[in-house]
Image: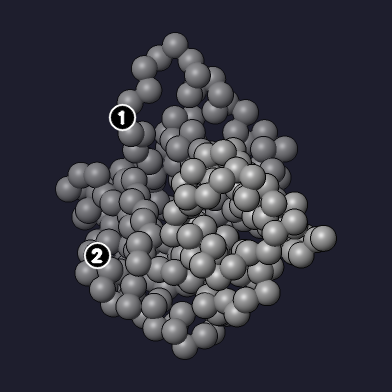
Amino acid sequence: MTFSEPFGSRLRSVRGELGLTQEAAAHAIGTTQRHLSFLETGRSAPTRKMLGRLVSALQLSAAQRVSLFEASGFRSPYPTRTLDDAEVQATLDLMEAQVLGHWPFPAFVVDRDWNFLRANGPGERMIQAFGGVPNMHALFLSPEFRAMVTNWEQASGSFYTRIQSVAKRSPLVRAALDAAVDEGRFDHVAQVLGGPEDVPVHIPIDVQLPDGAQMRFTSLHGRWVSVHDALAEQFEVELLVPLDRASEGVVSSSFGV
């Protein structure tokens, strides 16, 4: 008798995302491979206790937890929230106040599509300086920004690999990246990253602004580690980092730090 085919297929899909065999997943949650097989084929129904073991032992993302609970028939302890939810907005407010507000250079909170959700003062002025772009990939892939990067041959490898990583979770970014690849904008990246020359520890981005000022920078990004919400776990903080004193001065004069 089949109890929960939807749950079984969801569990099998999540296990595949984690790259675990049935045997490895069963060992991690303290059950038998036979029992896990029964859950995945619908021959056994999940219990709430088993759901708790899956969530805790397999280190599931919030989105994966939601997926399993939705298919289980049990009430999910992970509500589906939207961007205008009060708790989500409070989290963004906290990130803006306690992280962006203390960073002296442009800083942003972005969602999985790299849309700007929050920015500090310098970040807001930087967005406006580049025409009010709505997200980071629109900035990085714009012809205007490309024209400002004076070491594009080298720096574009960093942009390409970073955008690739975001494109894995964002169909919007994937479409933008595919269009740029089709245009040949990154044809040289394989040669740069796979050529005979040593690749440095990090490749700075050298930019010449329209007024002739030059700056060298990179960026740091991170996530709010205590988040247990499927929407909020996608939020990332992006911090612009000038790489020398002269660049700090350019950022200060250009974006009003």
Q: Horizontally, is 2 left or right of 193 in the view?
A: right
Q: How many marks?
A: 2
Label 1 Cα crowd, 10 Å radius (few <14 / some 14-19 / many 20+): few
Residue shown at 20%/44% (left/top)? 244
What x and y, as percent, mark residue 102? 22, 69
Looking at the picture, which amino acid does disc 1 mark?
Val
- Residue that mark 2 sits on: 103
Q: Horizontally, is 213 left or right of 75 in the view?
A: left
Residue 55 in view: no
Looking at the picture, which amino acid does disc 2 mark?
Trp
- Residue that mark 1 sits on: 201
- Is 134 placed above or below 8 here? below
From the viewer's side, name the closer residue of 114 and 82. 82
What x and y, as percent, mark residue 20? 56, 40
- Is 69 placed above or below 59 here? below
Which quarter of the figure is the C terminus placed in? bottom left
What x and y, as percent, mark residue 73? 68, 74
User: Most extreme residue toward the bottom, as rendered?
Assistant: 86
Residue 57 in view: yes
Cα–Cα gap, marks 2 and 1: 24 Å
From the viewer's side, name the closer residue of 85 and 162. 85
Q: Which of marks 2 and 1 is nearer the N terminus?
A: 2
User: Most extreme residue toward the top, as rendered?
Assistant: 196
